[in-house]
Amino acid sequence: ISIGVIILLPSVRYARHHKAPLSHASSIRSLRQAKRNSPVMDCCETGACNGEGFYYVAIREKEDGMQLQTFDDYKDALKLAIEREEDATRFYEKMAEKTHHAEQKSLLKRLAIEEKGHKKLLADFASDITNPPLGAFTPPEYSFDDVEERDLTTDKIFELALRKEEESLNFYARFLVYFYKTGHEDVFKNIFEVELKHKEQLERNRKDFAGK
């Protein structure tokens, strides 16, 4: 997996593959400034953002030589995002059914409801775009096809959920760049921030569960 450079946008810090064009960058910083152990890092912990609350997002590309799908029409890109939210909703609903621990089940059910809300938000947005982005959209890998549902422990469920939230953060960071300067950035910024909260909630819940 290759990781490129940090691109600083007004609302989010975003790491793109080094071969990607840097036309949207307002500032570039070395990835060495960011934490290496997580694809999502609060840059306030590095002292790089002076308390502004931006986030570093390391976009992870497929291995070299593997082709990423590209969408030439923004409508197709948004359709993909809506489908991913449908997948995420089903994922959390299924995972909630598989755990017998009340607190964890409640969290997973709530995440399913919030992912369903993202689907509605994106569907409404897709029908009301006044300034569409130009160019092609190449999403990072974000799929639920690799989810194995057999023999799942509660800890394994949270491991899977955390991985999917990391993929989701990468996915919406890419949309933030795609829609940069269209006037529609807040749609994806808001989804990104909710997905980040999902990840943080899952991490806390998993830690609490392990400590019992």
Image: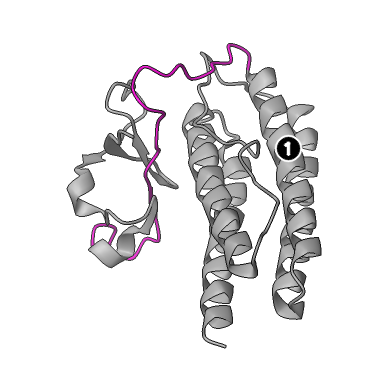
Instruction: Residue under label 1, please give it.
Output: 122
Q: Is residue 183 above or below residue 76?
A: below
Q: In this view, does 73 lie to the left or right of 56?
A: right
Q: What is the image's colouring?
A: one colour
- Amino acid type, mark 1: Leu
Q: How crowded is mark 1: few (under 14 residues within 10 Å), some or many (20 or more)?
A: some
For the view shown, which residue lies furthest in the bottom direction? Answer: 212
Whole-percent x and y of residue 180? 49, 31
For the N terminus, give its image quadrant: top left
Q: Is residue 206 above or below residue 20?
A: below
For the C terminus, give its image quadrant: bottom right
Tell me where the magenta segment starts and ends, as one range: 47-73
Whole-percent x and y of residue 4? 28, 34
Would you say residue 66 sits in the magenta stretch? yes
Whole-percent x and y of residue 135? 51, 13
- Residue 82 found in image quarter: top right
The answer to whether residue 55 of the structure is visible from this angle is no
Circle 1 — which element?
helix
Whole-percent x and y of residue 132? 62, 21
